[in-house]
Amino acid sequence: MDEAVKVRDAATVMLMRDGGSGLEVLLMRRHSGHAFMADRWVFPGGRVDARDGDAALKEAFSQPFEAAAGLAEDEDAARALTIAALREVFEETGVLLAQPEGTAGEDGPRLSAIFEADRERWQGWRQKLDEGSVSMVAFLDALKEACGRPVRLNASGLHYYARWITPGFESRRYDTRFFVARAPAGQAVRVDARELVESRWFGPEEAIVAYRRGEILLAPPTLCVLEDLQHFQKSGGVDALVAELEHASIDPILPQLLEDVPEGDEAVLLLPGDAAYREERVDVDVARCPPGRTLRERSGVTRVVRRSGLWWTERG
């Protein structure tokens, strides 16, 4: 494992809704010219910025902040990850998980109305946040002025789902925490047209079928997540998933490349829990994941195999 490649903290959010055929999740296509994951359909997200840890944001939430178990090493790091998740969703989709102070749910001034009234202005804020030229503190101040009252971030609407760590053979490495969030009613999804150029609501099974047909491109973590989400597509939907996450143990997933690839396979990624997974090869210091923990996943996937240009999941 190449220790020269820095592992950066990142956050991604699976925006979900209950559609006509059950649970649906938002996927977005990355620009074909992007240096990382070009043309792949992904969940909105990105790396943690230094400003996400701004002390002024400690009071920015609609409820007292409570870090999910195992999310980060300390509360400050957990808070920064949460801010990054909320910021990235707004930058990439235009959806803000927040509410004006003194309102409950859909009551009071609607953020959607504020954004729709001056799309160009708020698109500018999205771009500046993405560039890092403004902070979330400044953005919330601008929202307060537009709304006539403070706007509080809805951290409680994020539910910790998974933690994937980029393998050591990659040139860019991220320690990515995955969150689930219900899409707020009334807010339209609009791609930023820079990093992300297309968006679509998929049922998990529908997305997998589209991938198999060559209609969309998926990375192994996204494929594994969609496999898991199939369990909730027709069995309780978003509410059932969120309820299960309240009692879930989130184990880090650091894929390993199988050295002795079976004939006919192009590449094999091993996940914790696979019989061939080499526990002693996990670089705990770089990956910052607790030793001796294995993947507990409803889908039971233990490896992802590349054949004929496509990734396929297998169960041990």
Image (cartoon, rainbow, N blue to C red):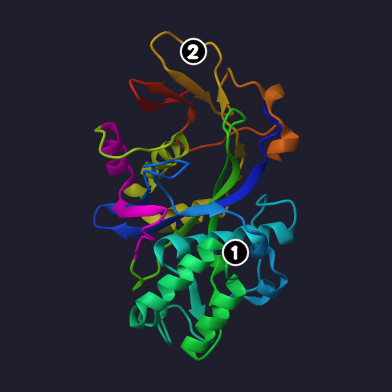
Seen in the picture, residue 56 relative to 47 is either above or below; the reply is below
Q: What span is in magenta?
A: 189-212
Q: Which one is nearer the viewer's eye here, 107 or 257?
A: 257
Q: Which one is nearer the viewer's eye here, 300 or 133?
A: 133
Q: Is residue 84 shown left or right of residue 31?
A: right
Number of numbered discs present?
2
Q: Earlier in the sequence, mark 2 or mark 1?
A: 1
Seen in the picture, residue 120 relative to 191 is either above or below; the reply is below
Residue appearing at x 41%, y 78% in the figure: 121
Residue appearing at x 54%, y 70% in the figure: 154
Q: Regarding mark 2 in the picture, which secondary structure is present there?
A: loop
The residue identified by callout 1 is 83
Which quadrant does the N terminus fall into?
top right
Please rate how many residues cluster around mark 1, counting C-alpha atoms within 10 Å: few if below 14, some from 14 to 19, many from 20.
many
Q: Regarding mark 1 in the picture, which secondary structure is present there?
A: helix
The residue identified by callout 2 is 261
Q: Quadrant of residue 33?
A: top left
Q: Is residue 26 visible?
A: no
Please rate how many residues cluster around mark 2, counting C-alpha atoms within 10 Å: few if below 14, some from 14 to 19, many from 20.
few
Amino acid type for the residue under numbered disc 1: Ile
Amino acid type for the residue under numbered disc 2: Val
Residue appearing at x 65%, y 21% in the figure: 278
Image coordinates of residue 48 in percent, x first then y, are 61, 55
